[in-house]
Image: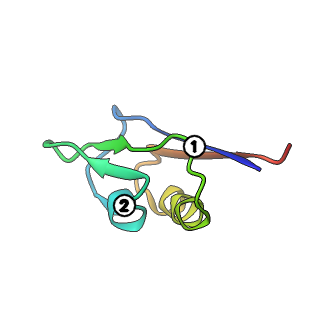
C-alpha cells in the first residue's frame, strides 16, 4: 500500500495539530504554516500518525491518499 501526503499551504490556519501528531511527516515554518517533511511515509508509525493528522486538521489543509495497489 502506498501513501501520499500533501498539504495546501494556502488553506492552513497554523493550528499545528499536524506537526504535533505526526512530527516525522509534518513541520511548521516560521509563520506556523504546514510543511511536508516526507510526501511518502514508509514507516508504519509515520503512516498511522499522518492518517490521524489528516483527520484532525481543522482547515482540511492536510491530505492523505492511500493506494491499495
State how the image is colored. Answer: rainbow
Label 1 CA crowd tier, 10 Å (few <14, some 14–19, many 20+): some
Relative to 69, say whether 56 is above or below: below
Q: Position of residue 40 (x, y in %)?
A: 57, 43
Pointer 2 or 1: first along the chain: 2
Outermost residue on the front side: it is 43
Q: Name the one closer to the observer, 28 or 8.
A: 28
**Can you tell which mark lies on residue 40?**
1
**What residue is drawn where x is 35% and y is 62%?**
17
On the rendered image, what quadrant is the C terminus found in?
Answer: top right
Q: Name the one closer to the observer, 57 or 45.
A: 45
**What residue is drawn where x is 37% and y is 37%?**
11
Q: Is residue 38 left or right of residue 48?
A: left
Question: Which residue is under mark 2?
Answer: 23
The residue tagged with tag 1: helix, strand or loop?
A: loop
Q: Position of residue 25 (x, y in %)?
A: 43, 52
Q: How much space separates mark 2 and mark 1, taking CA atoms?
A: 14 Å
**What residue is drawn where x is 47% and y is 63%?**
56
**What residue is drawn where x is 55% and y is 68%?**
45
Q: Are marks 2 and 1 in contact (CB under 8 Å)?
A: no
Amino acid at each position: 500500500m502506498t501513501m501520499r501526503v500533501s498539504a495546501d499551504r494556502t488553506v492552513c490556519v497554523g493550528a499545528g495539530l499536524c506537526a504535533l501528531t505526526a512530527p516525522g511527516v509534518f513541520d511548521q515554518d516560521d509563520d506556523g504554516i504546514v510543511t511536508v517533511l516526507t510526501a511518502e511515509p514508509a514507516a508504519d508509525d509515520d503512516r498511522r500518525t499522518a492518517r490521524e493528522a489528516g483527520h484532525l486538521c481543522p482547515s482540511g489543509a492536510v491530505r492523505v491518499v492511500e493506494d491499495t495497489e
